[in-house]
Amino acid sequence: MIAQGSSDEVLLARIAEGDRLAMQILFGRHQTRVYRFVLNMVRNTAQAEDVISEVFLDVWRQAGRFEGRSGVATWLLSIARFKALSGMRKRQDAPLDDKVAEVIRDESDTPDVQLQKKGKGILLRQCMTKLSQEHREVLDLVYYHERSVEEVATILGIPGATVKTRMYYARQKLSEFLRQAGVDRGWP
Amino acid sequence: MSAMPDLRGIEELLPWYAAGTLDPEQAAQVEAALAAHPELRRSLALAEEELRETVGLNEALGAPSTRALEALFAGIDAEPARGAPLGRRLRDLGGQLSEWFSPRTAGWATLTAGLVIAAQLAFHLTPSVQEANRQVAAGGPAGLTPSFSPREPGRFATANKDEAARSGSFLLVAFQGDAKIAAINDALAAVRAVVVDGPRAGGLYRLRIGPASLPEPEIQRIAETLGGNKGVIRLVLRSSE
């Protein structure tokens, strides 16, 4: 009998045999993180939900071919990235979602006023949203999705050394935006 | 152990160190560098701050609605049916049905019960009786060629597979994980129930308990009889199909 505590790999093996309950458990376990990863890319909640449905439908179809070279979570994020990028190429004129737009920096205040109003943490978040897609996704994968260097390399399809330098430059850019907003982190 | 990275190399690893996702060797290198170069701690503090805010930023995005799950299962329903191998389905029945594939552990009574259950499942769930016989024979003990006939009185429905699954009165049951084959068979035989489908989501099996004309009080009595057998039956539900 499948149990809620079964590992992702056990669930995948059951999904490969057509076990819908295993699919439901795997979906419930990973849907929110995959959704947030996709939403940061497509910036539209309806599209993000469409993408995660497609991601897990792909899992249903491909479960028997999962080789275990990366973890299941990494595999899911790889599929999600591919599908999100494919969708973005098709829907370049899609509107920005309200939820995502909320955190977009308000340009009307001076840096001092912003810092005073919002505090450093929120300012940092706003500067993160100004990062390029390439820099933002590596930040999310490392800090939020807790992917190792190798796992990020797998998801992005780049060498591990490139992952590390991309992360370094993303943090450097973040510091630059913060400096422009009146916060000097003293790094790099 | 690999060569110690230079300070720039250590700086590059600090985000992963803050996230706790470095391998032990690299984590040790970072810790050695932090001890030797305290100024790196300032950089680590910034990485920790970035981590906190990245997590906060993502958590503020909320969660998907149920629409995604509904769309997923609508897509799965549209896919071609994918049945589990007969062996997997038998293992799902309390985890004991695989015993009958092991001649040393199965007594004759258990073997017979297992044949009955396998035959019920195979007859109703596999594409053909011949295929079910082949699967049953492949797993049976040496020297025995098990077979079954859909016309054997008292045990099998004489209606064909599709007809048995469509017409009649039905219940949905889930079996206890440690239920023995013989006990399952006895429980079903006591109410003249036949397995016509399963396992479904939640480990549920659809039982045909009689003709469509079965009176409601009788259906209720059968459901209560099955539900009262706590050692075998975990759950009894009315089938809406």
Image: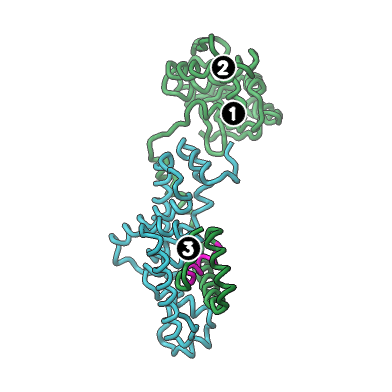
Residue nearest the viewer, comparing A121 with B131: A121
On the rendered image, what quadrant is the N terminus of chain A found in?
top right
Mark 3 vs mark 1, CA separation in Å: 55 Å
Q: Is the C-beta separation of discs 3 and 1 under 8 Å?
A: no
Type of amino acid at the residue the image marks with label 3: Ala
* Residue linked to disc 2: B115
Q: Is residue A112 above or below residue B28?
A: below
* Residue A74 image offset from top left, x and y in percent: 45, 54
* Residue B72 image offset from top left, x and y in percent: 43, 48
Residue B18 part of the magenta-drawn span? yes
Lower position in the chain sequence, tag 2 or tag 1: 1
For mark 3, name the chain.
B
**Which chain, by letter, is green?**
B
The colour of chain A is cyan
Mark 2 vs mark 1, CA separation in Å: 13 Å
Element at label 1: loop
Element at label 2: helix
Are marks 3 and 1 in one subunit? yes
Q: How is the image coloured?
A: by chain
* Residue linked to disc 3: B3
Provide the residue span drawn in magenta: B10-20
Q: Is disc 1 surrounded by few (<14), some (14 to 19) or many (20+) residues within 10 Å? A: many
Type of amino acid at the residue the image marks with label 2: Leu
On the rendered image, what quadrant is the C terminus of chain A found in?
bottom left
For mark 2, name the chain.
B
Q: Is residue B161 above or below residue A118?
A: above
Write the residue at 59% across / 34% down.
B238
